[in-house]
């Protein structure tokens, strides 16, 4: 296999039949030039980026090689841990994000993630990988990466899982849930324990409720008598759930049926009791 273009010491564009591909592996392009033969035994990753090919080539040429290596190590760890094949786009998205984050941290610019608690609860397996990645970056690049970055890495991994939501959708869901949690805490004058089972169940329920709206799936029904009991017996919790519904309608044009308000009431009441 001959090289069409050297991108860096560890990456090159090759041609397989009529298809151009990016080959990656330790030292496969070291001291190589166009038309040199590449040792395919050293190739660890080989893929076609399609229309994103040029963007990825640009990253491979301009991003420090150690950043690329660390990003690829995180991607490989994620694929093995989750037992999935991640979308090829993550090679662009995560590498670009990671390199930018490292450079900012080295310049002393703090990174904050206001959605960390929501990401941690909504995407727990990916968050655990994010924690591993943060420690890996510290060890490999000697950069003290804050835990906030574990959340951002988790989102990149989650959205790279095939047939899952986009990064924008995942961020939007986390933001909306963060706002709903804020309403509950304000109305009940409490600070919720993000490690509690009640909190985890509430976030999971809200996540699936938002998914139902986007996918236009029907909500679970609730008996009218049950709704009446919730309105009277758990009045404060029901009013809180109603305010969440009003907020979603006003800010996002999302409508939760009254049955869904009832189910949210049950979660709020459970949290209220435990606190």
Image: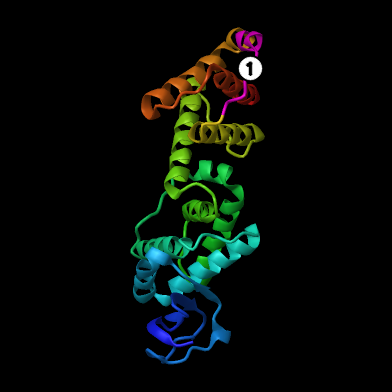
Q: Is residue 221 magenta?
A: yes
Secondary element at tag 1 = loop
Q: Position of residue 21 (x, y in %)?
A: 45, 75
Q: Residue 195: name its quadrant.
A: top right
Identify the residue at image location x=52%, y=20%.
Answer: 257
Residue sitting nearer the eye, 21 or 242: 21
Location of mark 1 (residue): 222
Q: Where residue 210 sits: x, y (%)?
A: 51, 33
Query: Does residue 138 appear in the picture of this structure?
Result: no
Over which residues does the magenta segment extend?
A: 218-228
Does 144 appear above or below 200? below
Relative to residue 199, is residue 31 drawn left or right? left
Q: Position of residue 245 (x, y in %)?
A: 47, 22
Residue 241 point in image, percent of width and height: 52, 20
Q: Quadrant of the C terminus?
A: top right
Q: Are there few (<14), some (14-19), or many (20+) residues within 10 Å of tag 1?
A: some
| Residue 59 in which image quadrant | bottom left
Is there any visible trace of residue 49 in the rendered image? yes
Q: Nearer the viewer, residue 228 or 181?
A: 228
């Amino acid at each position: 296999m001959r090289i069409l273009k050297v991108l860096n010491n560890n990456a090159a564009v090759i041609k397989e039949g009529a298809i151009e591909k990016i080959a990656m592996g330790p030292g496969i392009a070291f001291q190589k030039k166009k038309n040199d033969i590449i040792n395919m035994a050293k190739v660890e990753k080989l893929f076609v980026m399609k229309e994103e090919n040029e963007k990825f080539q640009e990253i491979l040429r301009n991003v420090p090689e150690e950043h690329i290596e660390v990003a690829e190590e995180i991607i490989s760890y994620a694929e093995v841990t989750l037992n999935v094949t991640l979308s090829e786009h993550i090679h662009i998205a995560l590498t670009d994000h990671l390199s930018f984050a490292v450079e900012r941290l080295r310049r002393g610019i703090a990174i904050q993630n206001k959605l960390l608690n929501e990401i941690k609860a909504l995407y727990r397996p990916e968050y655990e990988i994010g924690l591993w990645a943060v420690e890996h970056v510290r060890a490999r690049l000697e950069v003290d990466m804050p835990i906030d970055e574990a959340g951002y890495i988790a989102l990149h991994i989650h959205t790279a899982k095939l047939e899952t939501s986009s990064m924008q959708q995942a961020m939007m869901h986390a933001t909306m849930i963060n706002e709903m949690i804020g309403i509950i805490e304000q109305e009940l004058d409490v600070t919720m324990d993000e490690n509690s089972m009640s909190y985890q169940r509430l976030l999971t329920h809200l996540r699936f409720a938002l998914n139902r709206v986007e996918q236009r799936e029907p909500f679970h029904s609730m008996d009218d008598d049950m709704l009446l009991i919730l309105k009277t017996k758990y009045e404060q919790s029901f009013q809180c759930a109603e305010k969440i519904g009003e907020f979603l309608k006003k800010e996002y044009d999302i409508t939760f049926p009254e049955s869904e308000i009832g189910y949210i009431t049950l979660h709020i009441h459970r949290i209220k009791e435990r606190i």
